[in-house]
Image: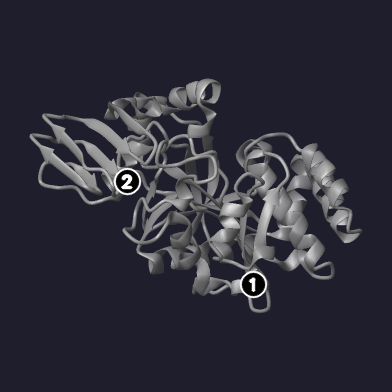
């Protein structure tokens, strides 16, 4: 495969940019989730990196940022895409909602030829490098989607037995081994099962990216989840009638599900392309160990910091007016901002949502 998509097709890139800002608190907040933070690059936010990565493959007017009403102003303020290309989902409906809202917009905007539009659904909270290898794999995924009429994801060969990621099984190869039929999606496994997945070599990390022609997406919804198919068409029709309230009411009827549960696990027409780029889901604060430089003692030190006798820790100071000092610290996370400080063992970062839940009750201004 030469990686070029079919001539004449419209290519729409949807970058999911929602989120609640919980797992990276206090760096992230309700109106400033992790994709608006510099977590993998010293000068660029995750969202800036995501837009730059896909830009060579899509016209500027065909890159859309999908987000929530809470984040709409923050996302628009970045000016990374034209304001009308920020798609604001009326209520939270997980990744199904993002894809359904974007699909309805695409149907409405190209009524005569919408079935031939190719859509790439990408995420804004991943570390991906190098970008040129990523783009080559995206081109392959697009061509697989166009040639097979299937739903295509990119899987990442595991570098470790990771319990925090979902997996997809690569079954028989298709199209000269560029892609594989999906053998099924697997939930976040136990440590023992994750080790089996790595040793067997058939299971890939599910990157969450998705590629399809719009016609194929709607055909698969028609077969596997006709209620969602009906609602997407209804939303598009409401757009056509300039009935914003009606479109939002139809959207609210969608189930609050991931696209995996709502469609991919029900479809027999799913393929996976093996990603050849370096990838990491920057999912929690301990991921900074992998996404930012470390010193000789294995520390991530960002900002105005003095560390003595400290190793294997993440010390991130986002307040230039304050000096953070640490002494004799091992395996800890210390995050300082202008109005909050977090201190916890590195292995406890998955519990940060317990802190944000407490703040919701007692100090919501700090969220």
Q: Residue furthest bottom?
A: 7
Residue denoted by label 1: 61
Residue 321: percent from left, percent from top: 28, 47
- The residue lying toward the viewer, choosing from 58 and 309, is 309
Q: Nearer the viewer, residue 315 or 348?
A: 315
Q: Which circle marks residue 319 in the picture?
A: 2
Residue 74 image point, x, y percent: 56, 53
Q: Residues within 10 Å of mark 1 (few under 14, many from 20)?
A: few
Residue name at image x 53 percent, y 72 percent: 57
Is residue 327 positioned above or below 231 on the image?
Answer: above
For residue 53, say whether it is visible: yes
Crowding near the residue tagged with mark 2, few <14, some 14–19, many ≥20 C-alpha atoms within 10 Å: some
Q: Position of residue 231 (x, y in %)?
A: 82, 45
**By what rule are the colours in the image chosen?**
one colour
Q: Are marks 1 and 2 in contact (CB under 8 Å)?
A: no
Q: Is residue 6 above or below residue 102?
A: below
Q: Height in image: 325 above or below 88?
A: above
Q: Looking at the rendering, which quadrant does residue 149 occupy? A: bottom right
Q: Residue at x 84, y 52 (%)?
A: 244
Q: Residue furthest left?
A: 309
């Amino acid at each position: 495969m030469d990686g070029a998509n079919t001539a004449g097709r419209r290519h729409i890139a949807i970058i999911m940019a929602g989120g609640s800002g919980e797992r990276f608190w206090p760096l992230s907040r309700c109106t400033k989730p992790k994709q608006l933070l510099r977590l993998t690059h010293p000068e660029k936010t995750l969202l800036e990196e995501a837009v730059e990565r896909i830009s060579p493959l899509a016209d500027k007017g065909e890159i859309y940022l999908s987000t929530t009403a809470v984040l709409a102003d923050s996302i628009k303020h970045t000016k990374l895409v034209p304001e009308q290309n920020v798609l604001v989902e009326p209520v939270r409906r997980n990744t199904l909602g993002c894809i359904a809202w974007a699909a309805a917009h695409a149907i409405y905007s190209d009524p005569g030829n919408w079935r031939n539009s190719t859509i790439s659904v990408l995420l804004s909270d991943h570390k991906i490098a190098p970008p040129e290898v990523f783009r080559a794999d995206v081109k392959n995924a697009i061509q697989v989607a166009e040639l097979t009429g299937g739903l295509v994801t990119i899987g990442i060969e595991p570098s470790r037995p990771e319990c925090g990621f979902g997996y997809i099984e690569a079954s028989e190869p298709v199209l000269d081994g560029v892609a594989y039929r999906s053998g099924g999606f697997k939930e976040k496994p136990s440590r023992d099962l994750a080790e089996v997945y790595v040793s067997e070599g058939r299971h890939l990390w599910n990157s969450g990216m998705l590629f399809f022609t719009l016609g194929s997406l709607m055909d698969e919804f028609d077969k596997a989840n006709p209620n969602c198919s009906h609602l997407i068409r209804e939303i598009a029709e409401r757009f056509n009638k300039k009935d914003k309230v009606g479109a939002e009411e139809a959207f609210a009827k969608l189930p609050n599900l991931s696209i995996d549960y709502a469609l991919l696990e029900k479809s027999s027409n799913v393929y996976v392309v093996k990603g050849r780029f370096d990838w990491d889901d920057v999912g929690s604060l301990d991921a900074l160990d992998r996404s930012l430089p470390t010193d000789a003692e294995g520390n991530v030190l960002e900002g105005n910091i003095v560390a003595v006798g400290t190793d294997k820790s993440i010390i991130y100071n986002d307040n230039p007016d304050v000096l953070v000092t640490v002494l004799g610290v091992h395996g800890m996370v210390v995050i300082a901002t202008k109005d909050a400080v977090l201190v916890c063992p590195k292995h406890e970062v998955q519990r940060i949502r317990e802190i944000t839940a407490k703040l919701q009750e007692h100090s919501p201004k700090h969220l």
